[in-house]
Structure formats: C-alpha cells, structure tokens
C-alpha cells in the first residue's frame, strides 16, 4: 500500500506540473489502496473479535487500522491533485515565487519516511518525520501567502495551486498521524507531532 501511494503522489504531481491528465492511473491505484485498507480493517477487526488480544496487541491492531486509513488518505489526496486538470481544464502560469516543487519533494519524502517507519519502527525516524512535517507546514503557509499577495492573478491559477498545496499539507499531516499511531502502539503513550 505504501509504495503504491508514493507512486500515486509522484505521478499526480508530475501530471499537475505538466498539466497532463494522469487521473485514470491515479484513480486505479487509489481504488486498489482503498480495497487494501478495508482488508486491513477487516482482518484487524476479525482478530479482535476472535482472539481477544491483550492491551499491547490491541493497541497495535488499533494503530494499524488507523495507519491503513492514513495511507488511504495519501492516495485520495493524490487523486484530488491529479483531477484538478479535469475540473479547471487549464490555467495560466503563476508569476510569483511559489515553492511548490520543494513542498512536493518534502511531502513525498514524508510518505516514504512514514512507510520506512512502519517497516523499521526506528524511533529516530519519528523525530526526522516531525521536523520535515514542520518544514512542510511552513512551505504551505508561505505558498498560500504568495498566492494571496499576487498582483492580479488568474482565478483558476490561484485555485489550482491553492488546492494542490492544501492537499500536500494534508498528506504531510497524515504522515505525522502514522508516526503518532506507531508510537502509541509501541509505548502506550500518545505523542502529538503537529
């Protein structure tokens, strides 16, 4: 699920930058991820019902249900980005200092880090993820300010970029939620990274 959603985000951003419709492929991947997410939820629920796990195992199952949902959200936001071209058709270029590429790179890095965290359960990754997520938040605010302060921008341009930076910011938040869920599963303590 994780690698597929990473590919979805990369393709969505490539389509956005090139103004190419990649939504059919992103939708197919997103639907696959949705099915897998529901399968994780079903299996975890079945384990809870049949095995009556103890506290630590129950926390782990709960965490993985939430993580599957977060990964599914990665793919749905990627789908939203890929569909902007269909909804707005086209928009003129933005003449200003946006840092969309940098924000997209950091968001893709967060998706990759959250997947690595799931695989390795390395505490150091939690803090690296938190640091990059904070940088992504700063880029989000910067980009929104640049769009708001633009001199006579085309409305479609502002909408396209504002939606994209918002979706990237939400993906970054869900990467933090994954780190929080894994920390809770491992320690029983709630950690808030945002």
Image (cartoon, grey):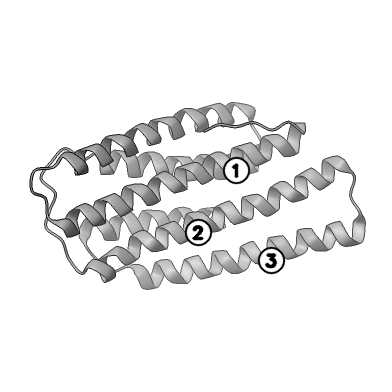
Which residue: 60% across, 56% down?
69
Q: Nearer the viewer, residue 51 or 194?
A: 194
Measured Cα–Cα span from mark 2 to mark 1 = 16 Å
According to the picture, the residue beneath numbered tag 2 turns out to be 4
Q: Secondary structure at mark 2?
A: helix
Question: Which tag, 3 or 1, sits closer to the chain's start?
Answer: 3
The disc placed on residue 39 is 3
The disc placed on residue 89 is none
Measured Cα–Cα span from mark 3 to mark 1 = 18 Å
According to the picture, the residue beneath numbered tag 1 turns out to be 178
Q: Is residue 34 above or below residue 56?
A: below
Which residue: 74% across, 49% down?
62
Q: Nearer the viewer, residue 26 or 52?
A: 52
Residue 178: quarter of image:
top right
- Mark 3: few/some/many CA within 10 Å (<14, 14-19, 20+): some
Question: Which tag, 2 or 1, sits closer to the chain's start?
Answer: 2
**Proximity of marks 2 and 1: CB atoms separated by less than 8 Å:** no
């Amino acid at each position: 699920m994780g690698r597929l959603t990473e590919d979805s985000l990369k393709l969505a951003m490539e389509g956005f930058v090139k103004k190419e419709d990649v939504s059919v492929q992103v939708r197919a991947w997103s639907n696959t991820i949705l099915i897998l997410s529901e399968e994780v939820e079903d299996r975890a629920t079945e384990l809870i019902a049949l095995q009556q796990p103890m506290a630590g195992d129950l926390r782990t199952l709960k965490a993985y249900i939430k993580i599957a949902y977060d990964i599914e959200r990665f793919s749905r936001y990627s789908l939203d980005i890929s569909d902007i071209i269909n909804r707005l058709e086209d928009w003129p270029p933005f003449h200003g200092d946006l840092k969309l590429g940098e924000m997209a790179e950091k968001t893709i890095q967060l998706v990759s880090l959250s997947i690595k965290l799931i695989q390795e359960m390395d505490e150091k990754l939690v803090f690296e993820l938190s640091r990059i997520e904070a940088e992504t938040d700063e880029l989000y605010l910067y980009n929104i300010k640049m769009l708001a302060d633009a001199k006579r921008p085309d409305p479609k341009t502002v909408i396209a970029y504002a939606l994209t930076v918002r979706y990237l910011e939400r993906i970054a938040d869900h990467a933090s939620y994954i780190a929080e869920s894994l920390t809770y599963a491992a320690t029983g303590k709630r950690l808030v990274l945002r």
